[in-house]
Amino acid sequence: MVTERRVADKTLKATLMKSPIGARPEIKATVESLGFRRMNQTRELPDNPAVRGMLKAVYFLVAVEGEPYERPKRSKYKIWRARSTKKHHRGK
């Protein structure tokens, strides 16, 4: 029974809170390798340095039990792109 408790203590509960759609391919691969298939899915993962590093890489998508999840805020300093002038000068 003692060994069963030790195994249970060494797990992390992680939930995929935000979709990786539109993220870089490395981020998508990390989410997939953690075993997440859909939003709001909770997984019990082993508590080891490899898994902790993967969770740290996708901290803005995943909530870990015992740590507060803060949704990423929109950028205040978005660089607006100028509109193309070709399309707007065709009729002239």
Image (cartoon, helix red, strand yellow):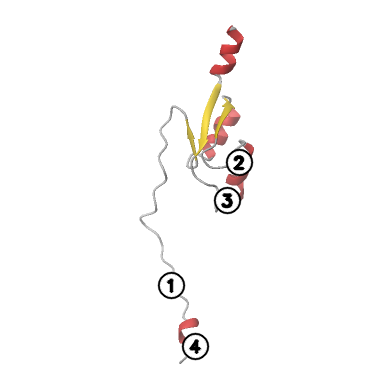
Lower sequence index among marks 2 and 3: 3
- Is residue 28 depicted above or below 55 in this figure? below
Q: Are marks 1 and 3 in contact (CB under 8 Å)?
A: no
Mark 1, Cα crowd under 10 Å, few <14 / some 14-19 / many 20+, is: few
Distance between mark 4 and mark 3 Cα atoms = 37 Å
Residue 24, given in percent of the width and then of the height, sits at: 57, 51
- Is residue 9 depicted above or below 41 in this figure? above
Distance between mark 1 and mark 3 Cα atoms = 25 Å
At 57% from the left and 42% from the top, the residue drawn is 38
Lower sequence index among marks 1 and 3: 3
Distance between mark 1 and mark 2 Cα atoms = 38 Å
Lower sequence index among marks 1 and 4: 1
Q: Which residue is mark 4?
A: 90
Q: Which residue is mark 2?
A: 37
Image quadrant holding the N terminus, namely top right
Q: Nearer the viewer, residue 41 or 75?
A: 41
